[in-house]
Image (spheres, rainbow, N blue to C red):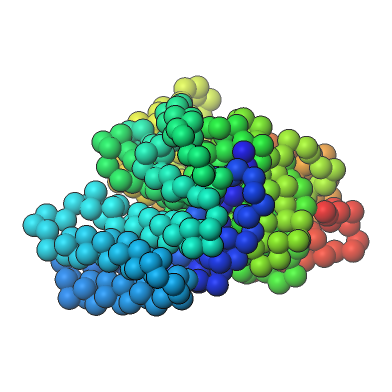
């Protein structure tokens, strides 16, 4: 069984959605995971915020505009009766329910999450009706029947596997194409929830891992993982093959093409991931698998919204157990640490979530002076045997000579060098690193593909 996931741009218009119908149509059984139509989730986020703030008139206008967008979408995607009627009925039902939420007495976070889920519910319903229109056998599987996160927001793979096996084993005589929603799930309280923004990739890899699929294909709007962020840097190019480790690091450290943790389930169960471009389906894309490459440097990525925390304390001098106590604070508040550097009397570390920052600071102040720098970016250089090549650091530091570096993490792994800079300096740092590491003809580092 193959898993094919199509992102927001790939289903972003009736024409694109029809194209997805063609791309999947090889007669082989598969699970097709769809995102919301591009732009919809952002609009639903805004809608939820407006209702939460009780700005009902603005919310009502936003809702009406989105309803109208989908009315046009349905007319174009499903030009014939009775399919068009069915499309309109689905959209009407969902928008009527959303409208009722404008008037509830207490608008809860569970309502807001329910709203966020509707983008994927609409796209999958419309696509499934379209598959019927073109007479292709298909079944809609509701992700809410098998995708689940636990009380810590972590996917429950055992549950997902059990439920999926059950659902897939039920008699679907005509079912060749199983269509389901990315991103959405149920939580431990059985409410509708989600796998965080960009989470449809994660849905696809969780499904692929759960049923031990032969391959997970992630179809998007670019020809695979590029060696730097193409939104910021010119002349980037796609990498044909990366290892799970490299892909996981790139995703975690900001390569938006993949959800930050979506590589993990695929790696755990050794299911290859292929990234493909819906606009150029013949282009090879990127294969993520166990195979390692002989490259020194694979790619550069950057993650914004980082907070650096420094704890300074004389008590660190020759002390043991100090770092353990510091780490325990982060454990207590379930906040992962990304980077860490230490000196004799101080330790600096970074976190990407400020959810518990005030409590963390209060607890750390028991150990010494605490200072906080917000709006930082981690720049991550990913490759293989990085520290074996003495040239690497030379080029990194000369690329960044005019940029103040807040922290440098080197040697923690042979696959990653991370550097913390102020968010304002990120673009310049990415561009300069690209020039020095990938476009410098005087080095042997930039062997790619
Ligand atoms: P989808 O909606 O299909 O999930 P996304 O917008 O989430 O697509 O991800 C694809 C986008 O990721 C690309 O259009 C590109 O701008 C951006 N991107 C950021 N970093 C990279 C990278 N290293 N390689 C490829 N794309 C990247
Ligand atoms: N629709 C969701 C988002 O925009 C999930 C996804 O597209 O992966 O974040
Ligand atoms: Mg995405």
Q: Quadrant of residue 263?
A: top right
Query: Does residue 409 show up?
Result: no
Where the N terminus falls, by quadrant?
top right
Where does residue 413 sit, x and y in percent of width and height? 68, 36
**Vertical order, 231 against 150 (above or below):** below
Q: Is residue 52 left or right of residue 389?
A: left
Where does residue 315 sit, x and y in percent of width and height? 44, 30
Depth order, front residue of 63/213? 213
Q: Residue at x 82, y 39 (%)?
A: 388
Q: Is residue 69 left or right of residue 324?
A: left
Q: Quadrant of residue 325?
A: top left
Q: Residue at x 78, y 37 (%)?
A: 291
Q: Residue at x 35, y 63 (%)?
A: 86
Counting labels gives 0
Q: Residue at x 58, y 61 (%)?
A: 20
Depth order, front residue of 3/287? 3
Q: Quadrant of residue 64?
A: bottom left
Residue that protrudes farthest toward the top in the picture: 320
Where does residue 274 sit, x and y in percent of width and height? 68, 48
**Vertical order, 385 against 238 (above or below):** above
Where the C terminus falls, by quadrant?
bottom right
Q: Is residue 205 left or right of residue 139?
A: right
Where does residue 164 sit, x and y in percent of width and height? 46, 33
Query: Does residue 268 show up?
Result: yes
**Vertical order, 164 against 66 (above or below):** above
Depth order, front residue of 97/443? 97
Residue that protrudes farthest toward the left in the picture: 105
């Amino acid at each position: 069984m193959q898993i094919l996931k199509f992102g927001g741009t790939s289903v972003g218009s009736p024409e694109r959605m029809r194209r997805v119908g063609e791309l999947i149509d090889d007669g082989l059984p598969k699970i097709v995971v769809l995102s919301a139509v591009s732009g919809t989730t952002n609009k639903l986020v805004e809608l939820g915020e407006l209702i939460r703030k009780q700005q009902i008139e603005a919310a009502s206008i936003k809702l009406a505009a989105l309803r109208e967008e989908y009315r046009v979408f349905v007319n174009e995607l499903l030009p014939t009766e009775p399919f068009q009627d069915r499309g309109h009925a689905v959209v009407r039902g969902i928008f009527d329910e959303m409208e009722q939420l404008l008037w509830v007495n207490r608008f809860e976070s569970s309502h807001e999450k329910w709203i966020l889920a509707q983008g994927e519910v609409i796209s999958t319903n419309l696509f499934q009706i379209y598959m019927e229109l073109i007479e292709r056998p298909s079944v809609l599987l509701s992700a809410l029947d098998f995708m689940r996160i636990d009380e810590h927001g972590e996917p429950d793979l055992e549950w997902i596997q059990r439920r999926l096996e059950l659902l897939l084993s039920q008699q679907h005589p005509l079912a060749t194409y199983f269509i389901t929603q990315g991103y959405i799930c149920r939580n431990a309280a059985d409410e509708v929830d989600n796998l965080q923004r960009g989470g449809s990739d994660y849905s696809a890899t969780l499904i692929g891992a759960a049923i031990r699929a032969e391959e997970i294909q992630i179809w998007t709007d670019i020809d695979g993982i590029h060696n730097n962020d193409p939104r910021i840097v010119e002349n980037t190019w796609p990498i044909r093959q990366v290892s799970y480790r490299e892909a996981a690091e790139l995703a975690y450290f900001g390569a938006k093409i993949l959800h930050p943790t979506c590589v993990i389930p695929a790696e755990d169960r050794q299911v290859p991931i292929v990234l493909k471009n819906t606009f150029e389906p013949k282009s090879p894309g990127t294969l993520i698998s166990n195979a390692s490459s002989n490259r020194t440097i694979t790619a550069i990525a950057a993650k914004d919204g980082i907070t650096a925390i420094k704890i300074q304390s004389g008590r660190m001098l020759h002390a043991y157990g100090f770092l353990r106590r510091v780490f325990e604070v982060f454990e207590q508040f379930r906040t992962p640490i990304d980077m860490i550097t230490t000196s004799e009397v101080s330790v600096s570390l970074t976190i990407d979530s400020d959810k518990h920052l005030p409590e963390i600071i209060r607890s750390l102040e028991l150990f010494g002076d605490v200072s906080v720098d917000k709006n930082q970016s981690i720049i991550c250089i990913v490759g293989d045997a990085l520290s074996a090549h003495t040239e690497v650091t030379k080029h990194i530091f000369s690329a960044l000579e005019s940029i103040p570096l807040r922290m440098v993490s080197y040697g923690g792994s042979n696959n990653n060098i991370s550097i913390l800079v102020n968010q304002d300096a990120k673009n310049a740092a990415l561009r300069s690193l690209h020039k020095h590491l990938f476009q410098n003809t005087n080095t042997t580092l930039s062997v790619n593909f």
